Image: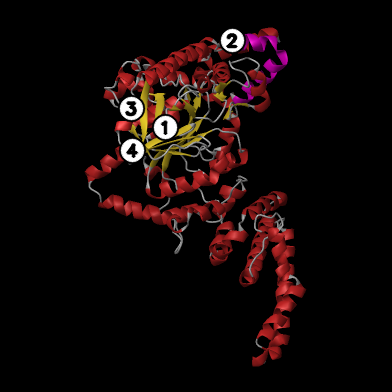
Amino acid sequence: MQSCKDYPESLSYKYHLAYLLGEALSKADKIWYKGGYFTLNKKIKEAKHIYKLHQEYKAKLQELHLSYCFIPKEFLLDSLSFLKAIETLMHKLKSQENNSFKIESFFFKLFSQIPFSTQTPFLLKHKEEILQWLNSKEFKEQYINTNHPYPPLLNPERLNAKRESKEKNNHNKETELRIKERESKECNVESQRENRDSIQPYPNLSYESIPAELAWDLNLPLPRNYCGILVFFGLSGHLALLAFLYQCGASIISLSNTRYAKKDYYAAYQTLLTNHINFLTHINYMQDKENRKHIFALADAKVPVLINLRDPIGRLKHGINHGWYKSNQWIYEINQHKEALDRVTYGGQDKPHLDLLESVLKNKNIGNISIWEYHQTIQEIRNASSIYYLDMQEIVGKRTFDTMTQLSQEFRFPLPKEEDRKFYESKINNQYRYLLPIIFRVNEEIKILVEQSTYNIEFILGLNLSSSIVGGFLAINDYNKNELLNHTFSILQDNMDIISQLNLDSLGLQIKILADKKQSQEIAYQANHSNLKNDLQQYLFALKEKIQSIETNKVTESQVLEYLKEHKDLRKIYQTYFEKEFVHIKQVRPDIVESWKYYQEFERMCAELD
């Protein structure tokens, strides 16, 4: 019943006068032998009073442009009083403000975010604290005057004061050596505490006392235990940058899945209560712009923001060559080589094609990755102390180590280690994208896992495949969790012919034999026979040819420019996008824009053709 669209409205019939009178009569009748009917008149008066209160409550909701929300009888009077108090506050602020429409529209927006249906007990219990905050100078300056999209119903500074006071005491108790050790790993939260000593914490409220689910409903910003915000734009080396950050030992919380922004917020909220984090990260996925806006609004610490960039013509080229999954199938029979390699699609075709530039324009995305909107993203990030742009070329080859050293000083994560220099200078590349990992079924007891042996940040992050070995269990499931191989153990047979004779290192691959955990490990050795080896050799030969074919058919930046040259309308629209989105980048980092070889060619081409 609760899933029905009219369920909340249907509950309102509990406040229909006939229902209330019938309820009064029923109660009197149940205790007729105790003289229940002598109290009927009193119960009828109570029913009429409740009916009147509910009518007034409904009218107040309509005045405040709020949809109907059923409130139990025990909260009805207090809820009505709360709404009246907020309305009175709104009228008071309107009388003090020249632009009364601004105040009214702001409060209407605020009212629509108040979760009466689920959080009524909390709201009424802390009614005075909420009203005091909404009537404060700080709230007006920080939220009303700035037209904040998600204003909090409690003062975040006061909620934070108790935790920071406790942290400060703990710091004082630590030895000097311990403090230095922590500072090398954590951000300097002292910058977040300036001018807060005078802030009094709430007597009975703090971040620790408020569950994450309630904090989301109250629009509370995330606890400010992070040093920076990372905003990733796809097709610009963000997976490589993440690999380098993890290698440095940076602590990162992801806020990337805007389809499930609440879950990301809940997880981040719990972590930040007890841990100092280097980065909150957000990959600009476009499924739900409102949730993205919500997440940015609730990450409001005054910290620097890191945004990755790339030559836009190079991004378009990479987007066309990127491809996507043709199907969600991960498990194949050992002889299904052709089907196992037919897993990549490029906008409905088997190889990259320049017509995808039209779909990028139409959908503003390739796959699910946002292409532009730098400008809009910057506007949505509130309180950024600075915007730090990082071009992809700065994390390529020998430049990477120095770049990560510089970033570690700016964002206070551990310095890269000299002994890891080779890793930072390596190319983080997944040449087997959408082809691996894959599982071949030999029989009911034996399966073969083929995967890339080199570092694959895409799978570690679980963007496309989640793979983990925990307590002897190897669980593999696709992004949509349609396939699951569980209750197995993995045996890496380095000394077996089936492994050693396939020359896997040259291909950057590794093979694992998966046997049913209930069976003896001898089962895995039964897989080492000539037919299986021949099947795997045929597959690996076909895989190598497939990779060569993919590389051969990739488009180049020059081809993208030529296509835009021949399609005037498309070129003009891209030109307009670039001019809008690169305004701030050109202002603060003109050197990066000037280093974009193909974008400079694009601008010259537009000037000549126009």
The residue pinned by badge 4 equals: 519
Q: Which circle's residue, 1 or 3, is located before the other in the chain?
A: 1
- Kind of residue at disc 2: Glu
Quadrant of residue 570 in the image? top right
Closer to the chain start, of discs 2 and 4, is: 4
| Rendered view: 275 above or below 75 | above
First in sequence: mark 2 vs mark 1: 1
Q: Quadrant of residue 568?
A: top right
Q: Give coordinates of residue 562: x percent, y percent.
A: 63, 8
The N terminus - image quarter: bottom right
Q: Which one is closest to the eye, mark 3 or mark 2?
A: 3
Q: Give the x, y percent position of residue 44.
A: 73, 82
Nearer-N-terminus badge (3/4): 4
**Do residues under tags 2 and 1 come within 8 Å of each other at their CB atoms?**
no
Tell me if residue 383 comes above or below residue 374 in the rendering. Answer: below
Q: Bounds of the magenta span?
A: 558-581
- Residue drawn where x is 61% and y is 56% of the image: 114
**Alpha-carbon span between mark 2 and mark 1:** 37 Å
**Labels 4 and 1: the sequence-earlier one:** 1
Q: Between marks 1 and 3, how big is the CA–CA gap?
A: 31 Å
In the displayed structure, would residue 517 be above or below residue 330? below
Nearer the observer: mark 2 or 4; the answer is: 4
Does the segment drawn in magenta span residue 566?
yes
103 inside magenta stretch: no
According to the picture, the residue beneath numbered tag 1 turns out to be 460
**Residue tagged 3:** 526
